[in-house]
Amino acid sequence: MIIGSNLLYYDTLTSTNTEASLLLKNKDLPEGTVVRAGFQESGKGQAGRRWESERSKNLLFSVILYPESVKPEEQFIISMTISLGICDFIDRYYMGSKIKWPNDIYINNNKIAGILIENSLTGSLIKNSVAGIGININQEIFSEDIPNPVSLKLVTGKELNTGEVLKELLSDLDIRYKQMLYEARDNIREEYISRLYKLKEWCIYKSSERTFTGRITDISEYGHIIIEDKKGNFKQFSFREVHYLS
Ligand code: BTN
């Protein structure tokens, strides 16, 4: 087992990603070390947003990775790998989880999990990667300003033991991580694409230039989304260049 070989648990942290980065500065931690918290005072979301989670109700952790074989320009493969591992885990309890590009995990039209991957680069290598994962397990009430949250409890009606389900999740992540390391990466990309939320469905998107009807057709090798518009033009966007509206 790589992911989950070393588990560090803290009652409270500012953010597990921040703590993992700090630990990396001071010591050599084994690959797959998991830094977990029961509560984050300042959980970080993507694009400078915050990640909210009620104390002890959910899973909040960061995994330390040394993906030596991944070049910086290929780093989206880590996002795809982690996303698939989380979907495998969620499918144990509720089938049909989807990935909203780039790496939000959805059940139906609601977000159940978020991923924040922070890579530290040295020259042409990824020195380390901190994969922060927040999954809503037992939380039933969320702040009103969180757009569309959901938890496993809300969809299944069942309360789960977070410590026990963590073991399953780490095992699912470990299987996917080994697939990334030792098997053809195209399989990961293809599976990631087939899991995409709104894949090939006509929807409204907003880019910096316009609001348009389009459908996701593909994801490039480097993680860009490819959207076809109604005129049959295909356009490629990087993260934050395009937003799904409805
Ligand atoms: C997002 O969807 O915006 C990403 C959310 C990532 C949240 C997790 S919770 C554990 C880890 N520590 C953090 O501060 N953030 C990530």
Image (cartoon, helix red, strand yellow):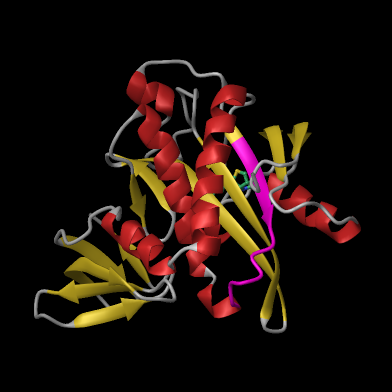
Asked whether residue 65 appears in the rendered view, the answer is yes
Quick check: 74 left or right of 204?
Answer: right
Quadrant where the C terminus sits is bottom left
Magenta residues (range): 60-71
* Residue extending furthest toward the front: 182
Q: List x then y, in percent, for residue 103.
A: 44, 55
Q: Can you give x and y, in whole percent of width and height, for residue 96 in the image?
A: 28, 39
Residue 57: quarter of image = top right
Q: Residue placed at 90% from the left, 57% from the top?
A: 26
Q: Is residue 70 above or below residue 151?
A: below
Task: Report the front residue among 168 and 45.
Answer: 168
Q: Nearer the viewer, residue 183 or 140?
A: 183
Quadrant into which the N terminus falls: top right
Give yes or no for residue 12 being in the magenta stretch. no
Percent of width and height locating residue 133: 57, 45
Residue that lies at the very extreme toward the right in this rendered image = 26
How many marks overall?
0
Q: Is residue 241 above or below residue 26?
A: below
Q: Residue 95: which quarter of the image?
A: top left
Left-right relation of 138 to 195: right
Residue 65 spot, x, y in % from top left: 67, 57
Q: Is residue 242 left or right of residue 11?
A: left
Residue appearing at x 59%, y 58% in the figure: 117
Which residue occupies the extreme top position in the image? 158
x 54%, y 70%: residue = 75
Residue 209 vertical placement versus 134 (above, below): below
Of residues 107 and 127, which is closer to you in this image?
127
- The answer to whether residue 209 shows anywhere in this view is no
